[in-house]
Amino acid sequence: MNLGPPLNTAAFEAFPTPAPDGNTLYFNRSMTFDSQDSDIWMATRARPTENWNRVRNLGANVNARDAMTLAPFISADQRSLYFMSARPERQGSVCAPATCFDRLELFVSTVVCPDRAQ
């Protein structure tokens, strides 16, 4: 079943990862497959029986400018978000899927308090 808008857009969405609560979905979004910026986003809903209605970019705490950030995975306790990223400040140049899969590194970010109001 296609999840439709607001999850699917004209951009490239990939790597959907549901949180154990069933009400949060982490995924990648970039403008195109070869885009220099690939960010992790999250969508929320009030209950598992409802549609996804709140979508937001996780921002600078996870995503970096001109970086390829991929494959979010949330821990069972929903306190740690693991992901892969190729970042220009660590690698020396801007990255896109066609040029830097071999430069991906693993990262973790602590989830302090997801803002479900946005």
Image (tube, rainbow, N blue to C red):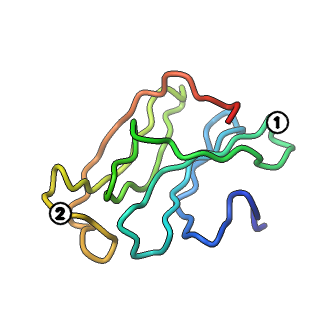
Q: Is residue 39 left or right of residue 66?
A: right
User: Looking at this view, is 31 or 109 the one in front?
Assistant: 31
Tell me which residue sits at (70%, 40%) in the image: 44
Q: Quadrant of residue 117?
A: top right
Tell me which residue sits at (71%, 39%) in the image: 22
Q: Dot 1, how many residues are within 10 Å of its Cα: few (below 14), some (14-19), or many (20+)?
A: few
| Residues at marks 1 and 2, CA–CA distance in whole angstroms | 42 Å
Q: In the figure, 15 relative to 96: above or below?
A: above
Return the mark for residue 1: none
Return the mark for residue 47: 1
Of helix, strand and loop, which one carries label 1? loop
Q: Is residue 81 left or right of residue 47?
A: left
**Residue 42, position in %: x, y?**
59, 45
User: Looking at this view, is 39 or 24 the one in front?
Assistant: 39
Which amino acid, by three-letter code, is at mark 1?
Arg
Mark 2 — residue? 93
Q: Quadrant of residue 92?
A: bottom left
Which amino acid, by three-letter code, is at mark 2?
Ser
**Residue 109, position in %: x, y?**
38, 33
Q: Are marks 1 and 2 in contact (CB under 8 Å)?
A: no
